[in-house]
Image: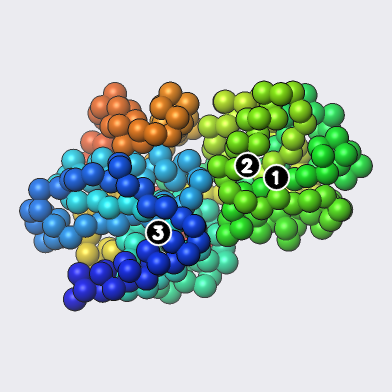
Amino acid sequence: MRSMKRRITGVVATAAALSLGLAACSGDSGEGGDGDNGDNGANKSEPISIGIASGWPEGEAASYMWKVMLENQGYTVEMETAEIGTIFTSLAGEGGYDLLFDAWLPTTHKDYVEKYGDDIQDLGVWYDQATLNIAVNDDAPIDSLTELADNADAFGNRLVGIDPGAGLTQQTQENVIPEYGLENMEFVISSTSSMLAELKSATQSGDNIVVTLWHPHWAYDAFPIRDLEDPKGTLGDAEKIHTFGNSTFKDDYPEVADAIGNFKITDDQLAEIENIMFNENDGEKNLESAKTWLEDNPDFEEGIFGGSSDDDSSDEDSSES
């Protein structure tokens, strides 16, 4: 029945992704897993499907790390890139995606968790200092969002955003723009890749630019940029990044659910992984990049699959959202 549901919802999810102009992660998906059942009864021949939020590098880094680690444990893993709303919808359905490693709470993805909370499972927090930001080139003439409206001309009267379904986009539209009187600026909503292309072009040519961005992100190492102060707190406080599974994940894959509960990553570790993926390999060898980092840090995987989870804060964070 689970396989039948997966095939049916897989078609629906794929059609939705295509309609949104989204592409599947193809070349790196590869083969994996030995098809054996684990000691806990989990069917390792049934692929675990990971939905990767389009354009969010920390989620890509975590997802590819987990593909490597799970296949090392004998599981088969499939991955697909999609818009964040599509992933939550699929997680909440019967089948489709099994995991999402990039859910931000208590603010950014609050609406999705409130909508689908009864049909998804919070599997734990793996990063706890995530922030949403508005960033400018390092030599921009302003330091705070309070100055942006009066200096809009210096930035071509444009605020460059990312994809329409992102929580950061919603926060910018509903909080940042009205609170700081930016209604007369053009808010460009397109995609993360388009925003980064504009950011790269502007910083290389010495032009001013203002973009929506977030920590952690490799762009802060790659480009001369800095965050604008947000004295009104329109983008919220530091958030936690959660992993969510579908409604039956803990029952279907108890060993994996326990391991995900052990998953924690530091700023330095995440910076190392993202640097390999997006700076050294230009985002073109993500699976190889994840393998490289894990091979250089063998204790990391051992700690995840050999340790015990002592973090119970994820349920509390989720219930408060």
Q: Which mark is residue 195?
A: 2
Q: Identify the residue under disc 1.
A: 160
Which residue lies at the image location 66% right of the left edge and 30% below the top edge?
201
Q: Sequence-wise, which precedes: disc 2 or disc 1?
A: 1
In the picture shown, does residue 266 fall above or below 26? above
- CA separation in Å, label 1 and label 3: 29 Å
Please say which color scheme the image uses. rainbow
Mark 2: few, some, or many residues within 10 Å (few <14, many ≥20)?
many
Residue 237 in picture, x, y percent from top left: 65, 48
| Badge 3 element | strand
Q: Is residue 267 above or below residue 116?
A: above
**Viewer-side residue, 258 vs 210:** 210
Residue 212, numbered circle? none
Please report whichever mark, 1 or 3, sits nearer to the chain's N-terminal start.
Answer: 1
Q: How many angstroms separate mark 2 from mark 3 (CA)?
A: 27 Å
| The disc label shown at residue 244, or none | 3
The image quadrant that residue 283 belongs to is: top left
Q: Taking 273 as reference, is 38 above or below it?
A: below
Which percent across, then down, holds residue 259? 27, 48
Q: Position of residue 49 (x, y in %)?
A: 30, 57
- N-term-proximal mark, 2 vs 3: 2
Residue 124 seen in the figure: no
| Horizontal side of residue 296 vs 31, given as left or right | right
Camera-nearest residue between 108 and 210: 210
Q: In front of the other: label 2 or label 3?
A: 2
Residue at image coords 84%, 29%:
141
